[in-house]
């Protein structure tokens, strides 16, 4: 990032150029920032303020024994559950006047400059984290269930329910119970459809315990020097934005729409001049995005509130 000149040494003409150059550097950093939780969300574009989609899956019933002389047994996928995503407009702006440029002694301008793109980055991470923070309550899912529940109805109601909710603090037995939920998963018609567990996601308060469980070759709570089956079984992801000190999640290997977590964008985040008419304003920028972060149903996320 370019160094700011000592206050008073930048002219009215050169100061905006320095600010623009610094803003571009910060913006480049933002574009390279993938986001820890962003990797679990499917980003899609939307051309209106609302977007209605269905959670129809790709699973069909198992193939049937059927001879060439018989009629083909045509089938359709389960109908799924509809979900409406409402996009929200987000804006924030900063202005630097000629007076502020001349009198700034505490780096106020620099702070305003850095804060605008960082504010947008933090907003998205807080929004993603809120999905996990509220994973065990409410009826926000397309099936009127929370993200993690033990009675999700299948799209084919005759197939019963499925379960991605466990209980208890993070320890070896409870983590294994959560892993078993991934192996016992069934698809939309009720047939077995196990998910490969990939990541263990939790907050900073659980980091030490999580590392003891999945990075040690021995059972951490056992005095008999027994080997553990959990070693190197999951990749550990610690997210600083998850507020719970007890909750933990297993994320599966599903990709695309099967993740069940979405970020819809009508307008990607951008920075533009606001073109003020006041001649005393020498630098003015606006950040704007139109997006929503939400979920339908997800057989890729398995969680415990840790209690």
Image (tube, rainbow, N blue to C red):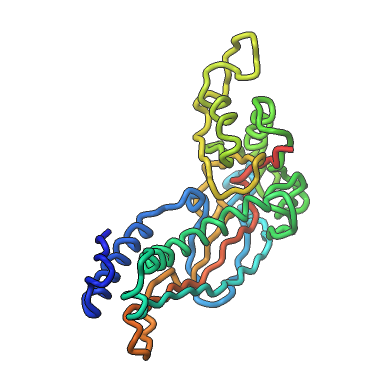
Q: Is residue 84 above or below residue 178?
A: below
* Image side of residue 278 versus residue 7, left or right: right
Image-quadrant location for residue 222:
top right
Is 86 in front, or is 236?
A: 236
- Does the rendering let one see residue 70? no
Q: Quadrant of the C terminus?
A: top right
Please determine whether, in this image, residue 173 is positioned above or below residue 266. Answer: above
Q: Is residue 83 above or below residue 154?
A: below
Residue sitting at 65 percent across and 54 percent down?
Answer: 297
User: In the image, is 268 to the left or to the right of 59?
Assistant: left
**Residue positioned 64% across, 8% down in the render:** 224
Residue 218 in percent (x, y) is at 56, 16
Residue 194 can be seen, yes or no: yes
Residue 227 point in image, percent of width and height: 57, 14
Is residue 217 positioned above or below 258 on the image? above
Residue 127 point in image, percent of width and height: 57, 59
The quarter in which the N terminus is drawn is bottom left
Say which of 211 and 276 sits in front: 276
| Residue found at x 60% / y 50% | 59
How many circles with numbers are drawn on the protein? 0
Residue drawn at x 72%, y 44% is 162
């Amino acid at each position: 990032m370019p160094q700011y000149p000592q206050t008073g040494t930048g002219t009215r003409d050169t100061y905006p150029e320095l600010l623009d150059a610094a803003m571009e550097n910060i913006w480049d950093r933002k574009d390279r920032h993938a986001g820890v939780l962003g990797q679990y969300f499917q980003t899609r574009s939307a051309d209106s303020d609302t977007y209605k989609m269905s959670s129809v899956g790709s699973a069909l019933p198992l193939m049937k024994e059927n001879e060439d002389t018989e009629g083909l047994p045509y089938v359709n996928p389960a109908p799924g559950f509809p979900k409406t995503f409402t996009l929200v407009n987000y804006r924030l702006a900063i202005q630097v006047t000629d007076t502020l440029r001349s009198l700034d002694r505490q780096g106020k301008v620099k702070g305003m400059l850095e804060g605008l793109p960082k504010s947008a980055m933090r907003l998205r991470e807080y929004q993603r984290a809120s999905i996990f923070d509220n994973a065990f309550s409410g009826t926000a899912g397309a099936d009127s269930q929370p993200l993690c529940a033990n009675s999700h109805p299948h799209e084919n109601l005759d197939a019963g329910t499925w379960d991605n909710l466990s209980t208890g603090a993070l320890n070896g037995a409870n983590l294994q119970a959560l892993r078993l939920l991934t192996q016992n998963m069934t698809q939309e018609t009720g047939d077995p459809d196990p998910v490969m567990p990939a990541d263990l996601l939790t907050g900073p308060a659980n980091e030490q315990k999580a590392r003891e469980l999945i990075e040690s070759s021995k059972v951490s709570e056992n005095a008999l020097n027994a080997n553990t089956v959990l070693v190197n079984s999951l990749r550990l992801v610690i997210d600083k934005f998850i507020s719970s000190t007890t909750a933990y999640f297993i994320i599966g290997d599903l990709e695309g729409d099967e993740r069940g977590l979405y970020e819809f964008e009508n307008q990607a985040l951008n920075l533009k001049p606001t073109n003020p008419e006041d001649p005393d304003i020498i630098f003015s920028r606006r950040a704007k995005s139109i997006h929503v972060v939400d979920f339908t149903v997800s057989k890729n996320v398995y969680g415990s509130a840790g209690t």
